[in-house]
Amino acid sequence: MRTSPPVRTAVFYLTALAFITGCARPIEYSVFGLRPLDPAPDPDNYGVGKVNSFQPVLRWEEFPRSQDRVADQKGLVNRISKVTYEVRVWRQRRRDFRPGGDFAGDLVYARKNLTTTTHQIEATLEPVGYPWTVRARYLLNGKQRVTDWGQQVRHHFFASDKRTDLFFGDYGFTTPPLPPMRVSR
């Protein structure tokens, strides 16, 4: 289930404010859709992984997932064929926490019809943060189907009033910073 952009933005704004002020801490991280494997989500960095390249390799779990196979009591998994994947990457807008603001920023990379669960981004990215997501497209009994776009959910505990809030969002990674420029004299 995906939340509407205004609700997601409002939840993110409140969660970001809580972290900035130091009154919340993450207590659990979970995923809807295909799980990202590389870059691995870093729970100590709000679920954002780090990469060491400006053309990183993204990797995610295969569809159908192992839990789909275990839960399948009607034999649907055996009728799935022609699985391909779609990937989308956005340039993160810095500090755009306003309600209604577009936190994900501009779509900078998208690919369809990927046949493996690994993809190296072909464009050269800038040294900033990038939300990303993936979904599977497949045939079930000859009819086209898609999974939901992958999404992370972080549960946060607010110590001040002993409550838990949720943050819904795409996966994320940060590219390395640019090396310092040398000035010749």
Image: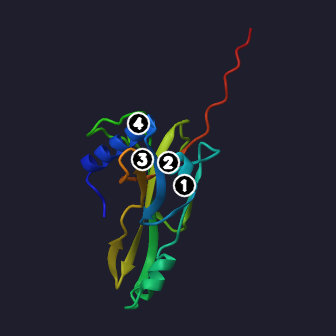
Q: Quadrant of residue 59?
A: bottom right
The local crowd at label 4, few if under 14, some if 14 to 19, many if 20 or more residues have their Cα within 10 Å, is some
Q: Which residue is mark 2?
A: 46
Q: Which residue is mark 4?
A: 93
Image location (x, y in percent) of residue 66: 51, 78
| C-alpha distance separating marks 2 and 3 | 17 Å
Nearer the N terminus, badge 4 or badge 1? 1
Nearer the N terminus, badge 2 or badge 4? 2
Q: Quadrant of residue 175?
A: top right
Quick check: 94 left or right of 40?
left
Q: Which residue is mark 3?
A: 159
Q: Total marks drawn?
A: 4
Q: Which residue is mark 1?
A: 41
Q: Is residue 139 above or below residue 27?
A: below
Residue type, numbered disc 4: Arg
Quick check: 171 left or right of 103?
right
The local crowd at label 3, few if under 14, some if 14 to 19, many if 20 or more residues have their Cα within 10 Å, is few
